[in-house]
Amino acid sequence: MLSYKAPPVRPISFPKRPSKTQLNTMQHTLPPLPYAEWEPTKNTLHLWLQIVGKVKLASAPPKNHWWHVPLYLDVHGLTTRLLPPGLWKSDMR
């Protein structure tokens, strides 16, 4: 008769959580972001988001407190989700 011996079971090791000191150090290691260098990008993004918001505002039925015009964050960036029929039959990203 053949017998089978299972390999020994090894305990699972999980990575240790960083200490508070390590977390504080990690937070201070972000690279500097000089405003003058990215100001044109910020302005362009701001204008494009205003255009997309106005399109959504014009194509969605009104609700209280502008709840019908938010932009949502997804894996590709900001999106309008599906727009009501009329101007477009899809979403804007």
Image: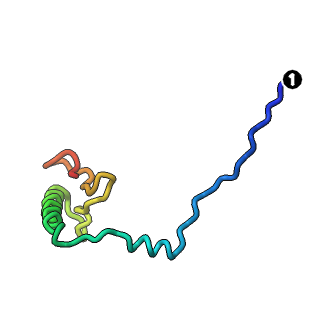
Q: Nearer the viewer, residue 38 or 55?
A: 38
Q: Is residue 57 visible?
A: no
- Choose top left, top right, bottom left or bottom right for residue 15: bottom right
On the image, the x and y values in percent for residue 71 come to 25, 60
Q: Nearer the viewer, residue 43 or 84?
A: 43
Q: Helix, strand or loop at disc 1? A: loop
- In the rendered image, the residue lying farthest to the right is 1
Task: Please give the name of the residue rendered at 75% of the width and 44% of the height, measured from the top-left corner.
Answer: 8
Question: In the image, 11: left or right of 82?
Answer: right
Question: In the image, 74: left or right of 60?
Answer: right
Q: Nearer the viewer, residue 92 or 11?
A: 11
On the image, the x and y values in percent for residue 61 come to 20, 59
On the image, the x and y values in percent for residue 35 come to 19, 72
Residue that badge 1 annotates: 1
Task: Please give the name of the residue rendered at 54% of the width and 72% of the height, measured from the top-left corner.
Answer: 19
On the image, the x and y values in percent for residue 7 come to 74, 40
- Amino acid at the residue labelled 1: Met
Q: Is residue 82 visible?
A: yes
- Choose top left, top right, bottom left or bottom right for residue 73: bottom left
Question: In the image, 90: left or right of 20?
Answer: left
